[in-house]
Image (cartoon, rainbow, N blue to C red):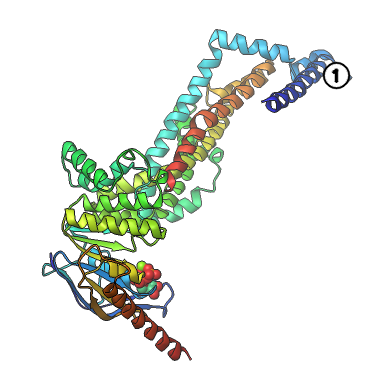
Amino acid sequence: MRHRYQRMLQGAIALAAFLVFWQIASITGIFGHMKPEYSQLLLPTPKSVVTAIFEMARTGYLWDHLSVSIARVVVGFLISAIIGVPLGIAMALSPLLNNMMEPFVRIFSPIPGVAWVPLAILWFGLGDQAAIFIIAIGSIFPILLGTIQGVRSVDRRLIEAAKIMGATQRKIVLRVLLPSLIPYLITAFRIGFGFAWRVVIAAEMVGVPKGVGYMLTIGRSTGHTEVTIVTMLLLGALMYAVEEFVFHPLCADGEAYASI
Amino acid sequence: MHVEISNASKTYLGDRAGLSIHALNDVSLNVNAGEFLCLLGPSGCGKSTILRLLAGLEFPDKGLVQIDGTSVIHPRSGVGMVFQDFALFPWLTVEENIGFGLRLRGEEKGTVRDTVSRWIDLVGLRGFASMLPRQLSGGMKQRVAIARALALSPEVLLMDEPFGSLDSFTRMEMQEELIRLREQQSFSSVFVTHDIEEAVYLADRVVVMTPRPGAIKTIVSVPLPHRRDRTGKQFTEIRNYLLSLYERASSHLREAAR
Ligand SMILES: Nc1ncnc2c1ncn2[C@@H]1O[C@H](COP(=O)(O)OP(=O)(O)OP(=O)(O)O)[C@@H](O)[C@H]1O
Ligand SMILES: [Mg+2]
């Protein structure tokens, strides 16, 4: 216990030193390299960042934009899961479908999700649809490939055991395949989710209105650099929370699931 | 149920061309209703292959595999199987594993619950009903696997080295258990083992198999009533006889290899 306390104290001291350094750099024109008015624009003081957090939370500005991005990610992600999981199962089970889909997967899966942003804006205009489209495209491949890998590595004896007990093809998929897939799906969703956030931020930065990506750029272009920094901190906190409270517990469950 | 294999041969085609394995050569065998048959033999002599043919998971290239006069072309009801490494569903609890087949059949919830609970008692797993397989010992897992197969009241139970991975104490306990279960519910059994003593302890007839290619060398009856005395005179005679068959076989092999 004492050890842990000590470690936290050491971390806190370093953090405090960093904040002091930041504060000094900000008010001294980055140690005399420029006029303090400029340096406070480029690097707002920690105090003004904290003030901005409370101010943005109070006016609802923060939640307005955050909720827009979350909604886009959730919808886009659901679409790619709804398409990716069944398609992955079908591809793993049907060599014909697999052979037909293979060239498309090979061509499209290495293309980074953000590369779809210009086309998406061209096709769907600057709005939710474009954002959802690229999120879906950006996260479908990890989900699809994870599902295929999961089906291929399902324990064949479990399928045989179910067959001997009289399971039909459909029951085998529902009662054996899907449960065996769960650990693979958790991993695939985790990767897909990371991709989804990256592309939605990129799309919002280049023109899709509202959302966290929009907050990042609007802070810069209107001279409210603290808004940009607040948004960065917010994204870090959000990713951490999702990892810690959603995927981490799920993975622990998934591992328990995977083997006897 | 009458099980009959006539002149069955099976060759597995290898992955690479030219590398095929002659797993069974001209095997004929029948299992009478209620009989306990042990397939005995060294690794690779085709014991599992025979079970898989009977289960409808594999088909012979030549010859016939029939149950009650019809060819086995897919897994059929009335035939249960216990796998060597249990093959329990890791995401289901003990009771859900045991009830798996009953639920597949569409039995009513109440019936499933009663049957499962009866089997949990019969295999001595009361108190473990809601545990997951990974929380159980090897012997307990095997009890679940046996209960899962028997809960469907099979007429034929196929068991592939079911006690192979258990320590010798648990193994003897499980052999006892199996005999007790057969007194409760009659079913014929085809039991794979490479433990000679286990075969003599359990079987009505021991099918002696030899490898390369897998074939039946002879069939030995064990006309002793159950609970058999492992140290008794007749028991040791039969055991020694089986042992001598394999010693001769392996010396032949050694000569052939020279
Ligand atoms: N699916 C398969 N593909 C190719 N060869 C196989 C396959 N299954 C079994 N064989 C081969 O057939 C032969 C008989 O195998 P089988 O599993 O029936 O032996 P076994 O008597 O059960 O052996 P063990 O005691 O080791 O389980 C072996 O040589 C094995 O390599
Ligand atoms: Mg085997």
Q: Is mark 1 within 8 Å of ligand 1?
A: no
- The residue depicted at 43 percent of the width and 48 percent of the height is A259
The N terminus of chain B, quarter of image: bottom left
Q: Label 1, on which residue?
A: A34
Residue closer to the observer: A61 or A108: A61
- Percent from the top left, x then y, of residue A200? 53, 31
Image quadrant of residue B2?
A: bottom left
- Percent from the top left, x then y, of residue B140? 35, 49
Q: Is residue A254 left or right of residue B127?
A: right
- Element at label 1: loop
Badge 1 crowding class, 10 Å Cα cut-off, few under 14, some 14 to 19, many 20 or more, is few
- The residue depicted at 43 percent of the width and 90 percent of the height is B256
- Percent from the top left, x then y, of residue B83? 33, 59
Outermost residue toward the left? B69
Q: Is residue A197 above or below residue B245?
A: above
Q: Is residue B156 above or below residue B145?
A: below
Q: Chain of mark 1?
A: A
Image quadrant of residue B247?
A: bottom left
Q: Is residue B174 above or below residue A4?
A: below
* Residue B64 shows up from this direction: no
- Percent from the top left, x then y, of residue B207? 26, 75
In this figure, what is the number of numbered marks? Answer: 1
* Residue A205 shows up from this direction: yes
Please tell me in which quarter of the rendered image ligand 1 is found: bottom left
Q: Is residue A211 left or right of residue B191?
A: right
What type is the residue that disc 1 sits on?
Met
Residue closer to the observer: A5 or A116: A5
- The residue depicted at 32 percent of the width and 43 percent of the height is B94
